[in-house]
Image (cartoon, helix red, strand yellow):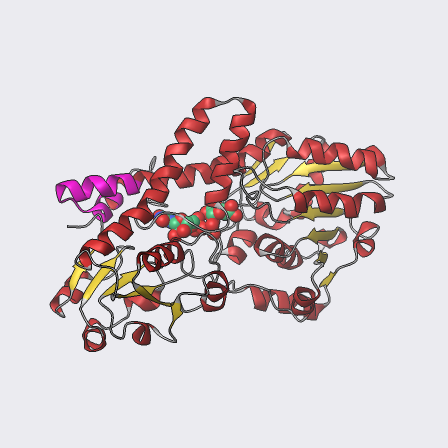
Amino acid sequence: TPTGSLRIAVIGTNYLGANTAAGMAEFGFDVIGVEIDEHRLKLLNDGKAPLYEPGLDPLLKKHVDSGRLRFTKDYREIADWADVHFICVGTPQTEGSDAADLAQVNSVVDMLAPLLTRPTLVVGRSTVPVGTSKLVEQRFHREAPAGTGVEIAWQPEFLREAHGVDDTLHPDRLVFGVQTPEAEATLRQVFATPIAEGTPVVVCNLPTAELVKGGANAFLATKISFINALSEMADATGADVTQLADALGFDKRIGRGMLNAGPGYGGGCLPKDLRAFMARAGELGVEEVITLLREVDDINYRRRARIVDVTHELLGAAWVGRNVTVLGAAFKAGTDDVRDSPALDIAGRIQLHGATVTVYDPEAMENARRVRPTLRYAGSALEACEGAHLVLHLTEWPEFRELDPVTLKEVVDTPTILDARLLLDAGQWRAAGWTYRAPGKP
Ligand code: UGA
């Protein structure tokens, strides 16, 4: 292929890195991914992602088999070989603080910089506080033998878990934070395929590119907290928040996306990115951003408390001796990721109050057990519902919408369901004799 001439290294192989590596190979490039963990490395070289992401394994397998993609733990293999290095490592929340933990980004610089002897483009894709790319650049210039021959660009990625492959191959937009026309030209070559398909490109400076990512996630979080606040309004007035969201969403300026009311946002991105954004705003003295987003974050966590309150109410104000079934453990459907999952958080709170909590999730059981070993786990939704005084619907897996309320009624103690995701067919459940409750719906 005409674009096949560039050799690409992708450092980090979690959601972002694994999708990036497979995506670049699909675009036609020779790719080497870097992963330092032996177990994950073995999986990847067998064409298997070390995480559950629909469609990713076949793409990895395709390109591992074609020889275009392989993984190594040795930075020496990429240092001289690659024309472009993508940094795709995680930036989790720092223990005991809101700020992003840049240890993994720093360690990439430590490992790679001393080995870079010729001019190279290093492109950051990780979500970082604004200003990070300049610090990374200084360190490369200081530590790399190639010195200022190492150029830094930032190209934030907006992929969603469970849609990672599609979002990587067909992004909504491309943002190139660059400092020279050469870097822009290289990135245009890397992304020639989506650009040819009409994907818009925003070429900007480094801080703009860093801010786009934090800004996008802060806005998405704000939309979710906005609709969750309106959900309280609906409860207070007998309105239906889903219809409200539909009607608001038809306004093109608003849009329907991210307006599903529910237990609030979770996952490895939105919650920690919002806090890191606030922490950076604090360092920069930008009060407006902190006050706005502090409330978004607070509304989000009050949702969880609210669902626990409604649970208590539905259990007749008793906790001890009550069996609560929690349907869902992943932070959203389509993933086995339980990081900051509202479902598991709510399950844990209910257990702390003294109820017996049994959890079922189609994909996230292993991760859930690891994070919350004291909860009970069942092998199916039906089994999880045995003897339940209340069933809680907390993750929007399609299989929960297929559950038959008539069959389920046979196994529960009390047919009461709290549909925190507002997605079950209320009429069907009520007709089967269930008490159906959904916050935000009459
Ligand atoms: C999010 C962003 O959507 C991506 O654009 C971004 O690239 C990514 O973070 C990241 O920073 O890496 P993701 O965390 O995979 O992606 O999940 P989303 O689909 O955005 O959902 C986030 C949370 O919000 C989930 O807990 C979900 O259940 C919740 N949500 C989503 C709602 O409560 N209501 C909605 O209408 C939509």
Horizontal arrangement in the rendering, residue 223 relative to residue 139 (left or right):
left
**Residue visible at 32% across and 38% down in the picture:** 226
Rendered location of residue 348, percent (x, y): 38, 57
Q: Quadrant of the N terminus?
A: bottom right
Q: Is 171 on the left or on the right of 24, as rendered?
A: left
Q: What x and y, as percent, mark residue 441?
A: 19, 50
Q: Position of residue 39 (x, y in %)?
A: 67, 67
Q: Nearer the viewer, residue 199 or 126?
A: 126
Determine the residue positioned at 25% across, 60% down. 319
Question: In this picture, is 203 found above or below 91?
Answer: above
- Which residue is at a point 35% across and 57% down the rendered structure image? 352
Q: Is residue 109 magenta?
A: no
- Rendering coords of residue 274 (x, y %): 47, 38
Residue 140 image-quadrant placement: top right
Residue 241 highlighted magenta (yes or no) = yes
Is 81 displayed left or right of 179 in the figure?
right
Q: Nearer the viewer, residue 438 or 401?
A: 438
Near-viewer residue (218 or 58):
218
Can residue 334 be seen at all in this image of the molecule? Answer: yes
Q: Quadrant of residue 317?
A: bottom left
Magenta residue span? 227-245
Image point (25%, 58%), residue name: 419
Determine the main secondary structure of the stretch shown in magenta.
helix
Report the number of discs.
0
Q: Is residue 178 visible?
A: no
